[in-house]
Image (cartoon, rainbow, N blue to C red):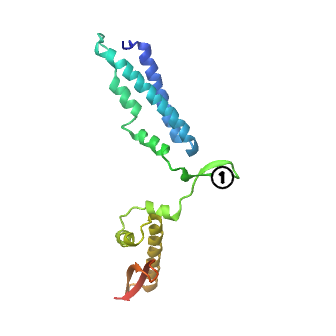
Amino acid sequence: MAAKITPNDVKKLEVKMKELEEEIKELYKAPDHRKSHHIRVIRDIQNYIEKKIKEYQPSMTNAVTGVKFPFENFVYVYRVKEGYFETQINEALYKPPGSFVYDEKTGKVEKKKETIADKVIKKTKSDPLDNQLETALSRLVPNETKRALLKQSVKEQIEAAKQKAGKDYKVTVQVGKNESGKPSVKVKLIKK
């Protein structure tokens, strides 16, 4: 038989909701190496709330009282703001382990510094030159990190050539493979 709902049960659920809210706020403030603890607690509270709602659901269909138990509210609040916090939880949960390093001097777990390749990969591809280089290099260099580094190098060469040559010259880029089969990029200046 389904569990009977008392005002006390509703109060308990409300307390759990508050706990969940506080725990999610803590997750935001927590350093990266502590996030997994908060995530476990959040998951436990979510499971508890879900279980209780399922327990109460059948008895509510036969409820004679005029007070309707706000199931939808509980479900939405614990998922918290249309999944926004859920995304944060998942991001913290599935962060690659390589993104943290243990500093032996300080004894702390710290976030690993971004490499040049990471920064280049993260950049938006709104730059037309960036898109053209990406298209040309993707045929030659399958590895994304190597391609990003090569692309950065080519862009630096192009900038240097532009500054050196001035307005009388245009810059052309030839992408191909050299005699040994390795990717080769040539930046040339051609008089207009």
The crowding category of the residue bearing disc 1, from other C-alpha atoms within 10 Å (few below 14, some 14 to 19, many at least 20), is few
The C terminus lies in quadrant: bottom left
Q: Quadrant of residue 121?
A: bottom left
Measuring 49% from the left and 61% from the top, which residue is drawn there? 118
For residue 25, side relative to residue 62 (left or right): right
Furthest-right residue in this view:
105
Q: Secondary structure at mark 1?
A: strand
125, 39: nearer the viewer: 39
Q: Tell how many labels.
A: 1
The N terminus lies in quadrant: top left
Residue 55 location, x and y as percent?
A: 38, 19
Q: Quadrant of residue 143?
A: bottom left
For residue 26, side relative to residue 108 (left or right): left
Reading the image, the residue beneath label 1 is 103
Measuring 44% from the left and 30% from the top, which residue is drawn there? 46
Residue 191 location, x and y as percent?
A: 36, 89
Measuring 47% from the left and 81% from the top, which residue is drawn there? 180
Residue 167 location, x and y as percent?
A: 38, 84
Residue 184 location, x and y as percent?
A: 44, 79
Q: Quadrant of residue 183?
A: bottom left
Please say if 64 is above or below 156.
above
Q: Amino acid at mark 1?
A: Asp
Furthest-front residue in this view:
180
For residue 106, side relative to residue 146 (left or right): right
Furthest-bottom residue in this view:
191
